């Protein structure tokens, strides 16, 4: 099999799936079912393979690290027990000959991802990762309400379990959604580590990835996410994942309420070309 040398790993950032209410404070958080479905179908029809973030990391390893085993830079935070199963990748059919990969991510853990998005995800064979605010499982979006946004239900334990059963990856997004650079390092570590720990206990699965709330991070916060045992963490800055990418500052492409299919195609095209 001819495998291209320079794969494109794109991570998309979504929040809620549903119609944006007229009085929404942050309309960018909403993407309608119709838009989400047309975006997913576009990716599918254009040869993109959907990945969870753990799979993305394994593939990145496969493309860039296997042949480069002495380079520690790409071996961040993979302990002996967590060895990424490189050799099983081909068997798992993860390799896409065209080298086009997309990882869909949903920040926060809005229940709308389950109620409005899961059918689209299942019907189209999509894999995705949901970053859950661990202290608000089964609750509401407290931090957003404080910022003036409408009340929104959060995923329940059952929803999360069903999503994990459908092959979705669950990631952590702190306990309470603070700006991590604005609180003490101890408090930040507690938010990061406890969110991993709580979700692992609650769902009895490994939580490998993290997303910084508001994309707010700095060098210290990044170190704390590494220390907590994650495989990587997502930010909100635009870009794709490249050979030299820092897995604790993974760029994404934000999809918003006004991202129609034309804008979506343009975003994908531009990020591949310019980043
Ligand atoms: Zn968030």
Image: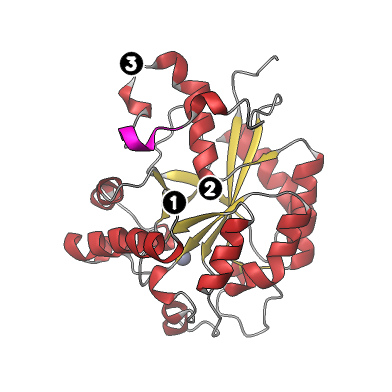
Q: Which residue lies furthest to the front in this view?
A: 204
As drawn, 221 above or below 257: above
Report how far apart the C-alphas of labels 3 and 2 lie in the structure. 28 Å
- In the image, residue 199 lies at what x, y percent? 40, 63
Displayed quadrant of residue 83: top left
As drawn, 265 above or below 147: above
Say whether marks 1 and 2 touch (CB < 8 Å). yes
As drawn, 11 above or below 90: below
**Residue under circle 2?**
252
Residue 19 in the magenta stretch? The answer is: no
Query: At 59% from the left edge and 73% from the top edge, which residue is drawn?
Result: 111
**Residue under circle 1?**
235
- The count of marks equals 3
- Quarter of the figure with the N terminus: top right
**In-front residue for pair 13/85:** 85
Query: At 35% from the left edge and 29% from the top edge, which residue is drawn?
Result: 75
* Residue 66 in the figure: left or right of residue 110: left
**In-front residue for pair 166/23:** 166
Q: How crowded is mark 1: few (under 14 residues within 10 Å), some or many (20 or more)?
A: many
Displayed quadrant of residue 46: top right
Query: At 55% from the left edge and 64% from the top edge, which residue is drawn?
Result: 161
Q: How crowded is mark 2: few (under 14 residues within 10 Å), some or many (20 or more)?
A: many
- In the image, residue 43 lies at what x, y percent? 75, 44
Q: What stretch is highlighted in magenta?
A: 79-84
Q: From the image, state whether disc 3 or disc 1 is nearer to you.
A: 3
Which label's residue is closer to the chain start, 3 or 1? 3
- Quarter of the figure with the C terminus: top right
Query: At 44% from the left edge and 21% from the top edge, which residue is drawn?
Result: 65
* Residue 165 in the figure: left or right of residue 196: right
* Residue 88 in the figure: left or right of residue 180: right
**Residue under circle 3?**
70
């Amino acid at each position: 099999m001819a495998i291209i040398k320079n794969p494109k790993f794109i991570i998309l950032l979504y929040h809620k799936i549903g119609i944006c209410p007229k009085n929404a404070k942050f309309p960018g958080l909403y993407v309608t079912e119709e838009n989400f479905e047309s975006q997913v179908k576009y990716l599918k029809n254009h040869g993109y393979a959907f990945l969870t973030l753990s799979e993305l990391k394994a593939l990145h390893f496969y493309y860039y690290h296997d042949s480069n085993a002495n380079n520690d830079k790409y071996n961040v935070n993979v302990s002996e027990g967590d060895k990424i199963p490189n050799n099983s990748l081909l068997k798992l059919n993860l390799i896409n000959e065209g080298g086009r990969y997309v990882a869909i991510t949903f920040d926060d853990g809005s229940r709308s991802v389950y109620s409005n998005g899961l059918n689209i995800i299942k019907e189209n064979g999509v894999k995705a990762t949901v970053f859950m605010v661990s202290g608000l499982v089964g609750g509401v979006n407290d931090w957003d309400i404080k910022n003036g946004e409408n009340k929104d239900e959060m995923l329940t334990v059952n929803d999360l379990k069903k999503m994990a059963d459908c092959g979705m990856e669950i990631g952590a997004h702190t306990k309470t959604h603070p700006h991590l650079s604005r609180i003490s390092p101890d408090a930040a570590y507690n938010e990061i580590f406890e969110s991993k720990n709580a979700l692992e206990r609650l769902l009895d699965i490994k939580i490998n990835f993290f997303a910084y709330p508001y994309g707010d991070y700095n060098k210290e916060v990044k170190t704390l996410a590494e220390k907590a045992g994650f495989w990587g963490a997502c930010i909100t800055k635009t870009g794709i994942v490249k050979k030299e990418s820092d897995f604790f500052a993974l760029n994404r492409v934000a999809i918003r309420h006004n991202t129609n299919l034309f804008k979506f195609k343009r975003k994908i095209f531009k990020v591949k070309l310019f980043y």
